[in-house]
Structures are given as C-alpha cells and as structure tokens.
Amino acid sequence: MKPTIKDVAKKANVSISTVSRVINQKGYVHEETKVLIDKTIKELGFVPNQLARSLTNRSSKIIAVIVPHIGPYFYGQLLESIEAQAQANGYKIMFFNVQDDPERELEYIKFFEQYNIEGIIIASNFQNANKLDEMKVPIITIDHILDETIPSITADSVKAGELAAQKLIKGGSKNLAVFRGPSFLMTTIERTLGFKKEIAKHNLYAEIFDFDLVNPDAKLIEQILRANPHIDGIFCYSDTLALVVQSTLQKIGRRVPEDVQIIGYDNTPFCEWVNPPISTISQPINLLGKQAFLNITRLIRGVELDTLHEVIDVEIIERKSTR
C-alpha cells in the first residue's frame, strides 16, 4: 500500500498541515523541520498526488502521450491527431519526449503518479515496460507491441515490406538493398520480414544496412553506395533516410530512377517537393492517433476492446523515384 501524507506526518512527528505546507511550498516551516519532512518523504517513498488534492474526487481528464523524439514528421502529426480527438471529447493531453532514455522514462512515471493521469498512450520503444503494471491505469501502444497483454495499434509493417519489394521488382531492380532503422524495433523486423518474403518468391536477395532513421549518417551512406555500385533498388524505412539516399546518389552521379529506384516510408510532404518526387509507403498517421485515443478512452470507461492488437492498412504512393 502506498504511503500517505498521514504516514509522513506520523513518522516525522509533525502535523498533516505542516507536511502539506512543505509539499506545496506555501506558508512558513522551520528549516530543520522542512529538512526532516523532505527526508521522511524520501524514506517512505511518498508521492504527493497534486491533482487529487485540487480536483477532489473528480477525474483529471488528462491522457499522457509518450514519444521517443519530437523532430520527425510522424510524431508531430501523430500528436496533433491525438490532441484534436482529445479536445473534441473534453480531454487534455500531456506529451513526454523520452528520447529513448530509460532514466527519463522513470522520471515521467513518477510524474504520472503525481498528476493522476487517466491513461497513457506510448509511441516509443519504452524500456521500462516492466514498470507499467504499477501504474494501474489503462495503457495502449502505437507502432510498438511492448507486451502481448498491452493493447496496441500499429500499421501493417509486413505488408509495407511486401509492397515495397513488389514495386522495386516490377520496375526491374534485381540488386536490392534495405536501408532500415534499428534492428530491435518491431516495425523494422516486420518490414524486413515482408520485404524478404516477397523477394524470395523471385529468388532475389537484399543487402541490409542499419541507420538512425532521424539523423542518418550521410557519410556512411555515401561510402556504402560507392562501395556497392551494383545496387539498383533501395527500400528506406523513413522518408528522411530516402531523401538522404537520393541526394547522395545524385552527388555520386547515379540517376534516380534510371540507375537506382528508391522507396521511402511515411509519405511526408517533402517527398513531393524534391526532384524526382519520392515513391513511399503511406501509413495513416491521423487514423493511428485517433484510433489510439478512442481505444484508450474505452479502456478508461471499462469497455473491452474488440481487438487487443489492431492493425491498420498501408498503401504505396507511386512517384518518379521508381519506374
């Protein structure tokens, strides 16, 4: 059982009102007493519930949204879609940028406890998944499956890999490469599975290279492309990566799509602005966000979901980087 403010007051041998003044930093408390109370709070592991005090027994109507980065287009659009749905339903969202840092995750878990968060939407590869059971609030993941028991909503990554392979093969590519994200990500694994499954039907092989999807190493990409002039078709696991690849190919004198076909992933707006425009796999980001919000509110109301792990369809957007 979690310690209460009464437990702190009893152990420190002070009144509850004195503890309250220290927690809220309001009113005078002797410095020695303040130090004693702070020490007692740490020893007991007491977490003050800020919203519970201000809202009494009412719900907070706050949903936490965890993302690994703010920069990529995907997460910006995802947050906007969740926020729009939340606003329409009388909720507020608080978003947290964990930057793939497990220590930041733990800090935010404490914050969730303090502010009476009603539900959590996780769009990151949360590394403290074992701590989530302690939250005692509904959780849903986007683009990740952290645990078979935690509901999720994801794009069909296997199909994405299949579609990309089909298009490159149809355009005549035979020496294929995959420029993907970190190999431990579920999306990376599934896209690779779909791609390899499809090319195996044609007795083809793909060389695989791992990159940071947000800040790909342009120098490394140039080294790989110069060392492998036979590559004539590349599936990139983000549009950012596809843009760097296309720019690098043009730099070293290889034509797109005549010499090398390129397919990206996400269908971000800049795919249409470059020359040639980049073919890409489109996942319905707005639908992912809206559906995640609807599902988390169903869980908050105690409604059982029809599907624990929901998979949303994807499509290929053909432009001039493929033949």
Image (tube, rainbow, N blue to C red):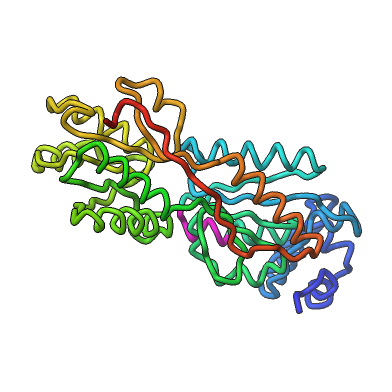
Magenta stretch in the rendered image? 100-106
Quick one: quadrant of the N terminus? bottom right
| Residue drawn at point x = 31 percent, y = 45 percent | 166
Q: Can you give x and y, in whole percent of width and height, for residue 163 in the image?
A: 37, 46
Q: In which quarter of the image is residue 303?
A: bottom right
| Residue drawn at point x = 81 percent, y = 52 percent | 60
Q: In this view, does 210 lie to the left or right of 227?
A: right
Q: Can you give x and y, in whole percent of width and height, for residue 225 in the image?
A: 15, 39
How many numbered callouts? 0
Q: Is residue 14 above or below residue 285?
A: below
Q: In this view, does 174 lie above or below 34?
A: above
| Residue drawn at point x = 9 percent, y = 38 percent | 229
Q: In this view, does 279 lie to the left or right of 131?
A: left
Q: In this view, does 80 lie to the left or right of 240?
A: right
- Tell me if residue 151 is in the magenta stretch: no
Q: Is the magenta stretch mostly helix, strand or loop?
A: helix
Q: Quadrant of residue 188?
A: bottom left
Q: Is residue 311 left or right of residue 227?
A: right
Quick one: quadrant of the C terminus? top left
Q: Can you give x and y, in whole percent of width and height, for residue 293 in the image?
A: 69, 49
Q: In this view, does 252 lie above or below 60?
A: above
